[in-house]
Every structure is written in structure tokens, then in C-alpha cells.
Amino acid sequence: MNWSIFEGLLSGVNKYSTAFGRIWLSLVFIFRVLVYLVTAERVWSDDHKDFDCNTRQPGCSNVCFDEFFPVSHVRLWALQLILVTCPSLLVVMHVAYREVQEKRHREAHGENSGRLYLNPGKKRGGLWWTYVCSLVFKASVDIAFLYVFHSFYPKYILPPVVKCHADPCPNIVDCFIAKPSEKNIFTLFMVATAAICILLNLVELIYLVSKRCHECLAARKARAMCTAHHPHGTTSSCKQDDLLSGDLIFLGSDSHPPLLPDRPRDHVKKTIL
């Protein structure tokens, strides 16, 4: 599988990620994708051929292998990495959509017209929700796959010898797994890196939610102070302050805010004067 495509696409995610997101992306590609490509595929490349049972009964080895290895580690990891990395592409696509909307607006109304977004890559409105949902989805996928691995392979450990009595084996036979110690090391390494990625996703989620709550409280406090300073109903400057505070009033949707001039603070000065 060619993972360079995912690496090229996800390299743009760094521009729109927090520090925790950048650490997560580095961890995924260095300690998960790279380890998967360089070592894991080679370790599990001959697992079926080297699965040896002490019987010559035709079909017994295949049946026992399927019983103890219903899904290959390598294929599960490949599916897990694809599902974990794809949500980050939605963030890039959402930013690209915003940039296209901004470009079309300028082409239709001229360069001197107002702007739809102060910064298309800033996590506000619908983009904030897209980013948060991607974090929840990535953490959920890793948790689900850790549960699946634990269901198939208890404690994530492969025993060196397994006993099989499935048909068409004539009796209980001993089957030997190739390189169990090496496979256990890489399995535990992949499990540990997945757990760290889950922790990073949860920390980043808490950081984004707490930061947004703090900004919302600060914006409400600023509006209250502005209303107190303008008791006669002069609220135009208060509304401009809301817009300048980062489009907090558009947290729940991705609808376009009122068109803003290229230099909104100069516009506020002119309005006040």
C-alpha cells in the first residue's frame, strides 16, 4: 500500500492544527505508519506459511489458523490507520471550501467588497465543529480497534503454542506460531502508540472546548461592559466588538457573518468618529 498519498494530503493539516494536533500527526506517521511499513508487514508476511501443526491431516492447519487468526494484524492496522487519518482530510476540505467561497465572493463583488471570513483557516463556526467531530471520530476509531484486538487476542499477547480441535483435525493438535515474541513486541508497541494518540485527541478536545468556553464568557463580559457604557441604546460599537472577537456569535452554524471590511478596526474608528 502506498502511504505517501496520505502523507502528502495530511501535511496541510499542520497549518490548521493546534500543538496537540501536530504532535498527534507526527506520532501517527513516525511511530505508527513508519513502523507498520518498515517492520510490521515483514514480521507478519509469512505467518500462515510458518503456522505449523503436529498433524498431517489435510486442511487441519488452515482451519486452525483461521480459528486463532480470524483477521490478520496487518490488515486490521491498515484499516485502522486509514480510518484514523481520513477525518483530518475533512478539515482540509472544509478550509478549501471556505477559500473557494471567499474567492467567488471577491470575483462577484470586487476586491474592495467585504469579506466572508476574516481567516478561512481559523477554527470558528462550522470549521470548529468539523475539527471537534474529527477528534471524537479519531479517538472512537482507536478505542474500537483496541477493543477488537483485545477480543481476538486476549491481553494482546500471542502464545507460542495453541491447541486446536476443530474439524477436520482428528484430535487435539498443537500448533506453533512463528516468531511469537517478535510479534508480541510490535503488537504492544502499536497498542501503546494508539493509546497515546487517544490521549492526545482527548487532551486537544478538552483544550478546544475550554478555550471556546473562555472566549464565549469573555465576549459576554465585553458585551455587558459595552452595554453599561452605552445605556442609551448605542450598540453599533458593541456589535463590531463581537465581530472582532472572532465570530463567536456564529459558533453554532457555518452561516456567513455580515460582510466585514478588509480593515474592520479602521471601519470602527470611522463609525465612532
Image (spheres, helix red, strand yellow):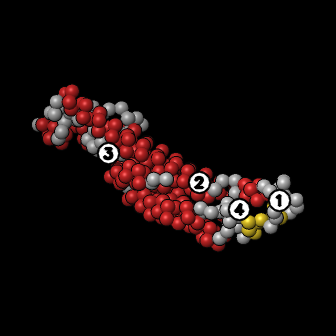
Which residue position is annotated with label 4? 154
N-terminal label among 4 and 1:
1
- Quarter of the C terminus within the rendering: top left
In the image, 110 versus 82, the foreground residue is 82
Which residue position is annotated with label 1? 57
Q: Nearer the viewer, mark 3 or mark 1?
A: 1
Residue visible at 42% across and 61% down in the picture: 26
Which residue position is annotated with label 2? 75
Q: CA distance from mark 3 to mark 4?
A: 43 Å
Q: Amino acid at mark 2?
A: Arg
Q: Nearer the viewer, mark 2 or mark 1?
A: 1
Looking at the rendered structure, the secondary structure element under dot 4 is helix
The x, y position of residue 207, in whole percent, is 43, 55
Whether residue 92 is visible: yes
Count neighbours of disc 3 (C-alpha within 10 A) and say few if under 14, some if 14 to 19, many if 20 or more: some
Above or below, 24 against 231 in this view is: below
Residue visible at 15% across and 33% down in the picture: 112
N-terminal label among 2 and 1:
1
Which residue position is annotated with label 3? 121
Looking at the image, residue 262 sits to the left or right of residue 26; the answer is left
In the image, 167 versus 94, the foreground residue is 167
Looking at the rendered structure, the secondary structure element under dot 3 is loop
Q: Amino acid at mark 4?
A: Pro
**Quadrant in the rendering for residue 195:** bottom right
Q: CA distance from mark 2 to mark 1?
A: 28 Å
Q: Nearer the viewer, mark 4 or mark 1?
A: 1
Q: Amino acid at mark 3?
A: Gly
